[in-house]
Image (tube, grey):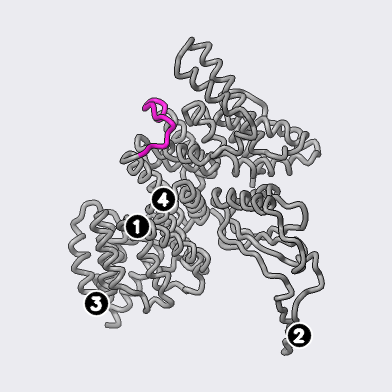
Amino acid sequence: MRSPCTRACEGALAIGPRKREAPEGRGRAGTPAPEAHRAIEAIWRIESARLIAGLARIVGDIGTAEELAQDALVAALEQWPTSGVPEKPGAWLMGTAKHRAIDLIRRRQTLEHKNEEIGRDVERAQEGIDLDRAIDEDIGDDLLGLMFMACHPVLSKDARVALTLRVLGGLTTEEIARGFLVPVSSIAQRIVRAKRTLAEAHVRFEVPGGPERVARLASVLEVIYLIFNEGYSATAGKDWVRPALCEEALRLGRILAELAPTEPEVHGVVALMEIHASRLRARVGPSGEPVLLLDQDRAGWDRLLIRRGLAALERAERLGGALGPYALQAAIAACHARAATAAETDWPRIVALYDAVAQLAPSPVVELNRAVAVGMAFGPAAGLDLVDALVSEPSLKAYHLLPAVRGDLLRKLGRSEEARAEFERAASLTENVVERELLQGRAAECAAEGLAG
Amino acid sequence: MRVLVLAKEGEQSDAATPPTPEAMAEYQKFNEELVKAGVVVGAGRLAPSSQGKRVRFDGKKRTVIDGPFAETKELVAGYWLWQVRSIDEALEWLKRAPYDGGTFEVREVPMHEGM
């Protein structure tokens, strides 16, 4: 493993156009610099989102804000190993970065003569120069503004995800690349391009209100849930789950719930993630193989996360109005969480909840899930009827769970040979190695059943 | 990772002066900051050890011991469960806590392997 110092320095240097030496020498000279570097990296994790958000408000764009924040980090890496970590490291970083922001704005102003808007920027920046105020200020709106900006609909989903993890999660390009199993250069490019797109589209740093807020918030929730799902059901690679991604998503969700506490769907998505995350341990067998919901050892579920999830769902419900798609899915997850054994699951209620999801956010995937619930509540034949209606659905053509579900229902109906073919088809469609093995195993079981029958 | 932060603040006797409103406000502000950062997943304060019990195991024998317990400096007074990315992050948060006494212990609660 590479040292945290290298990573922090590299992150700082990869972004800024300014050329500066990585201050690594001191660490090797035998001072307690490695410890200072570790502390600085941890402080960066804590402070970077707030720092970038505050700077983005001043300078207006994420790219410049991140550069300034990274500059402040480089300054910390240079000074703290000898001077010690200041008492209020966040305020120190913000103060350093704000001075640079003001310098930058002044330089821009000189270059571009008198531009009214920039003049206002300087005023705003100067107002914020007081360190105590900088730290005590309600940074909530800044963070929310940064979330809205990083998740702007003008960006592709991939770009939104990468930018969000970078500026709000404080993850390095390398860490993001590792999380999504793509080359570091792809993530770096994605982030650079995302910043350029935001600049070219003149996306402003703002917290929108009214109908725009609803649409923009939906994009933020989508990004957070995408990150969670990539960790929860890895679409590719050899691991079935990547918990670190789930943790990042949960953290972002919990932060958002504090920033926008009156939005029911924010609590809905948090509830959904908390309850799903409660099963992370139980979802993976001893040799890394997936264990499906109904086969899981429920004693392995994380009661703390279930409790948090149920509380978040209650919060969404208390805010009134009809439940949104995330809260409804959380309510479905809650049905499973409340059942002490798989046999005690309230399937008719789950069917009713899926009906509601299908009304609000109809999609073939929701229909497929509904079919599973119907199969459990009213028998495999009823479920199979619904699944058969989805077979010609173009968007599910390459979706491995369609043949997997169909195989399951066929098997329950004793049609082993058809079930085997479906499981094999499902196995050929998934890119996740362990999931493929699970599906191939089912196909083999069906073949054996067919011979026995 | 999830860490358990144990507050070994030393035993408060029932007669001890309660914390000042200022100290309480500072503590609340710190706790709020942790919650806003998505760090806190659980927390609790323990009742004095005079209300606690211990069970000692010795072969088949079980002995119940009533509080208060003698090792007053090492007694856990409260705990936090934090979701953080590293022990270092937990330490950076902990250093910001508005306490002027006591020892705090940070221990990882292993959940699963990282990414």
Q: Main secondary structure of the magenta part?
A: loop
Q: Nearer the viewer, residue A145 or A422?
A: A145
- The residue carrying pointer 1 sits among few (fewer than 14), some (14 to 19) or many (20 or more) residues within 10 Å by Cα, namely few
Label 3 belongs to which residue?
A413
- Tell me the element at label 2: strand
- Tell me the element at label 1: loop
Q: Position of residue A337 (x, y in %)?
A: 42, 69
Disc 4 versus disc 2: nearer the observer: 4
The residue segment tinted magenta is A198-209
> From the viewer's perspective, is residue A126 above or below residue A246?
above
Residue B7 placement, left or right of A271: right
Counting residues from the start of the chain, the first of labels 3 and 1 encountered is: 1
Q: Is residue A204 magenta?
A: yes
- Tell me the element at label 3: loop
Q: Position of residue A45 (x, y in %)?
A: 59, 43
Residue kind at label 4, given as amino acid type: Thr
Disc 3 versus disc 4: nearer the observer: 4
Label 4 belongs to which residue?
A262
Q: Nearer the viewer, residue B59 or A416?
A: B59
Q: Mark on residue A104? A: none
Splitting the image into 4 quarters, where does residue A344 fall? Answer: bottom left
